[in-house]
Structures are given as structure tokens and as C-alpha cells.
Amino acid sequence: MYLLAGIASAIAGLVPWLITGMRLPVQNLWAGTVFPGRMPVAFLPFSQYALTLIVALIVVGSAIAGVVARSSRAQHPRFAVVSLVTSVAVVQVAALVQTTLTVLHGLRDTLASTLYLAALVIGTAVSITVGLVLLVLIARAPAAGVVVALSIAGIALESWLNALVLPFGVASTEPNFGLLAAIRWVPAFVVGLAVVWAGIRSIGRVIAAIIGLLVLWIAPAAVTAVSAAAGSRVLAAHPAEMLDYGSQVFVSALGVAGGSLSLLVPAVAVMVLGLSASEAMGRWRVERVPVG
């Protein structure tokens, strides 16, 4: 059952890409001219324009498996988490291998193509590793570790939901704007609710809450910077300039004008309200306990 749950979780993580038909994005380094609808099918959207989406597809699938394990922890048979990790890894590595071979078959035989594919493969492999670590933390770690893991997964969840509402390669329309604007705040609520669930009754949990807020502030700025730098065709042949541009975008995104800092406001509000409500409920239960 846990092997099947892991497979289902990994596939669920790929859903925003599966609903597009899985046609490989048009490649700048492709050997020939191919129309978008005639590109080969690939299980991952290998493209410099889909870096954050690739991470989201991997990390969210692993996080779902972690939540499944955590929610059923009381009924865990032996090797349940191992089964989940194994099945998730098998699906994600298979998707990586199939996509790599598909892209390799179509790219021009040049050094630039080799470096491009190597960067995508390494980045995806790192994402798989990070996702599996988050899976284990969510499944088995103490509450403080779960808060940190969910905070990281919450950042990926935003990109995942964006791709679900507005599939990769599809032009935005007015009905999407409201949903996309609302999805922007999802990571803040994930962090806030994770802290409320864990509480702040120990030093470790307080530190985890602080780390969660730092992740919420820094990670979206990093995502914005990577997307802006990697998505620039002008800078593609100039790595140093691309890195410099990405650094500038990152610093800008950390400020109030960049929007990353504003995510802390709803997160802190959810924490304060949730923790206050939890404390009030605890007192009410104590008062209702009959004496004698």
C-alpha cells in the first residue's frame, strides 16, 4: 500500500505538466525546426524557462508522500517510509531518465547543448534529493523539523498551483488573474499553519518558526531571480552577466517593493491568531474538567 501511495504521490506532483500533454517545450538548441505541437513527449518540461516548475513538480510530489506518511503514522508497518521513499524516487528518476534521453536525441551536437542538458539534469537530480529529504522530515521528524520542511514545500506549492491554474505554455486570460493573485499568498498560509500546528512550546519550535519565516522571505526572491536570469535569451551566452543580473533581481525582490517581504504579514497574522485560538481552547478545556 505504501509503495502504491508513493507512486500515486509522485504522479500527483507531475499533474500540472501531465495536463499540458507533456510536449517538450521548444528548445533553442534543437537540431532542427519543429513546431511546438510536434515536439516529442517528455515526463518533465526540460527548458531554461521552466526551472521553477521542474522543482515544483518534484518537491510537491515528495511532500504529498510525506504528508501521507505523517497522517498515517499510527498505522505504520515496518519499512513504510522506506517504501514511500523508494517508490517516489523510482517514479521521479524514471521521469528524469526518459526526459534526458528524449532531449539528448534531439539537441544539436555542440558543447553548448551538452552544458545545457547537464545543467538541467544536475538541477533535477538535486531537486529529487531535496524532495526525498523533505519527505523523510515531514514523515518522521519532530514538529520543528516538519515546520521547516513544510515551509520549503510551501514555496514549491505556489509554482505548482500556478502551473495548475495556468498550464505551462498557455497564455494568461483575465479569469486567471484573480486565482494567480490569490495563489501568491499560499506559502504564507502554509508557514503560518505549520507553526500553529507545531506550536512554540520549546526553543526548537521557536527556532523552526523563525527559519520558516526566513524561508518565506528569501526563497520567493531566489525563485524570482533564477526565473528572470535563466529566462533571458540575451544573457544565455554570458554566464557572468546572467549571475550579476540574477543577484540584482534577488536583492530587489527581498525589499518591500519586490513583494517577498510582504508575505511575512499574513504568515505572522495566521500564527498569532492560530496560536491564540489554540491557547484559548486549551484553557477552556482545562476549565471544563470537573474537579474531584
Image: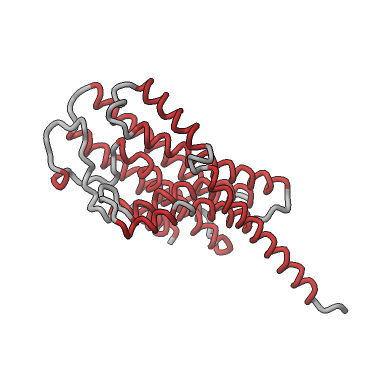
Q: Position of residue 148 (x, y in %)?
A: 58, 46
Image side of residue 169 versus residue 190, left or right? left
Q: Residue at x 78, y 77 (%)?
A: 288
Q: Report the residue at 24% width, 49% height from top.
A: 22
Q: Is residue 7 visible in the rendered structure shown here?
A: no
Nearer the observer, 265 or 95: 265
In the image, is 108 to the left or to the right of 267?
A: left
- Residues 207 and 232: in front is 232
* Quarter the C terminus occupies: bottom right
Q: Is residue 102 left or right of residue 69?
A: left
The residue positioned 67% from the left and 49% from the top of the image is 205
Is residue 266 visible from the viewing direction of this image? yes
Depth check: give the residue in front, 226 or 119: 226
The spot of residue 36 in percent (x, y) is 17, 44
Q: Is residue 225 above or below residue 155?
A: above
Q: Position of residue 265 (x, y in %)?
A: 58, 50
Depicted 127 relative to depicted 86: above or below: above
Q: What's the colour scheme?
A: secondary structure
Asked whether 8 or 190 is in front, the reply is 190
